[in-house]
Amino acid sequence: MNSNISLIGAPTDIGAGSRGASMGPEALRVAHIATVLEGHGLQVLDRGNLSGPSNPWLPPVDGYRHLAEVAAWNQTVHDAVYAELQQGRLPILLGGDHCLGLGSISAVARHCRDSGKKLRVLWLDAHADFNTATLTPSGNIHGMPVACLCGHGPEVLTRIGGQVPAINPKWVRQIGIRSVDEGEKRLVHEAGLEVFDMRFIDEMGMRAAMELALALVDANTHLHVSFDVDFLDPDIAPGVATTVRGGPTYREAQLCMEMIADTGRLASLDVMELNPAFDVRNRTAEVAVDLIESLFGKSTLMRKTTH
């Protein structure tokens, strides 16, 4: 795994239905994300925060809230993430709401096209985020980034990264899903997204889900993890605006991260939707940093590598 890490703050809640995710990057810094990663021998460079339009907090227009502002933020995120990848660094995007996954992953996809690598996206989330303007009355774009990445959405969003669609839905593995709108279910099914929802995890276990999600990841694979903090059960992670009960436990989440770390292929990361306005004494940020530490190799014992 690349040991040159860049932290990029994206302090905006432009695509969300509640204010507060804009404070997420600072909460992660308060929880010592840089120091924790440096403790694993990683070279961490904090690039500070990106800047973009403020949140006008307006109702949707033609099915989208804040479309111009969302597009501006995502273009800025795309450019920042792509620049780090071009320099051979591993970018960690500190969100911010999950609409920014569009900018981040479109940059990663562009980098993979440049370098001839295969892309695998692990989308850790309570929600499929595969909505469109016709499917959701809220117009909140943080429910749409995967759909936009797969070419379903307005051109100003689908074209970020220079190719439409930015990714093939077959490159995505969604894990921990437990809240999908009715029309969204049909679109997910038609697109052929591979989804390991909570029923699958309950029946088969996190280990089986992760073995399948990571199947065929090899030396020529760029592994991107988009970690929405609402992936976690709200009992351990209350600091999100869109909590859904019945998510992975602390140990299930740790196993998920440890198995990703075992591949040695993690090459970029989003940490999204942390909302300190809903948190209790920064507890959720601390849990998130703890899990990120596992993603970068923290384990209880020294283990023999199998790859």
Image (cartoon, rainbow, N blue to C red):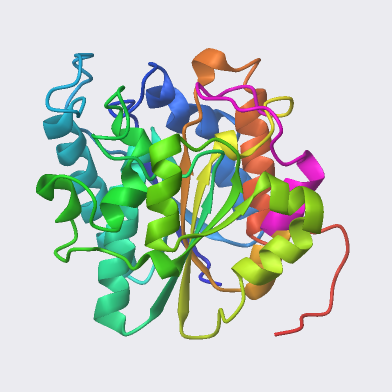
Residue plotted at (50% across, 39% down): 127
Instruction: Give the total of numbered labels.
Output: 0
Compare residues 95 and 243 and report the one nearer the observer: 243
Please state, as top left, top right, bottom left or bottom right, where the C terminus lies in the image: bottom right
Instruction: Tell me if I can see residue 272 in this picture.
Output: yes
Residue 132 to residue 256: above or below: above
Height in image: 258 above or below 74?
Answer: below
Residue toward you, 291 or 50: 291
Question: Whole-percent x and y of residue 66?
Answer: 18, 26
Give residue 163's position: percent from left, percent from top: 16, 66
Quarter location, residue 204? bottom right
Q: Main secondary structure of the magenta part?
A: loop
The residue depicted at 65 percent of the width and 37 percent of the height is 232
Say whether residue 181 is left or right of residue 162: right
Q: Is residue 303 left or right of residue 262?
A: right
Say which quarter of the image contains residue 142: top left
User: Can residue 6 be seen in the rendering of this structure?
Assistant: no
Relative horizontal placement of residue 119, taking residue 138 as reference (left or right): right
Give the residues drawn in magenta, as a range: 237-257
Q: Where is residue 57? Give x, y as percent.
A: 23, 14
Q: Is residue 37 magenta-colored?
A: no
Q: In the image, what residue occupies the spot 77% across and 80% down?
A: 305
Q: For the N terminus, which image quadrant? A: bottom right
- As drawn, the residue found furthest toward the right would be 301
Q: Is residue 244 magenta?
A: yes
Residue sitting nearer the eye, 219 or 125: 125
Say which residue appears at 20% left-offset and 21% top-offset: 54
Q: Position of residue 169 (x, y in %)?
A: 38, 64
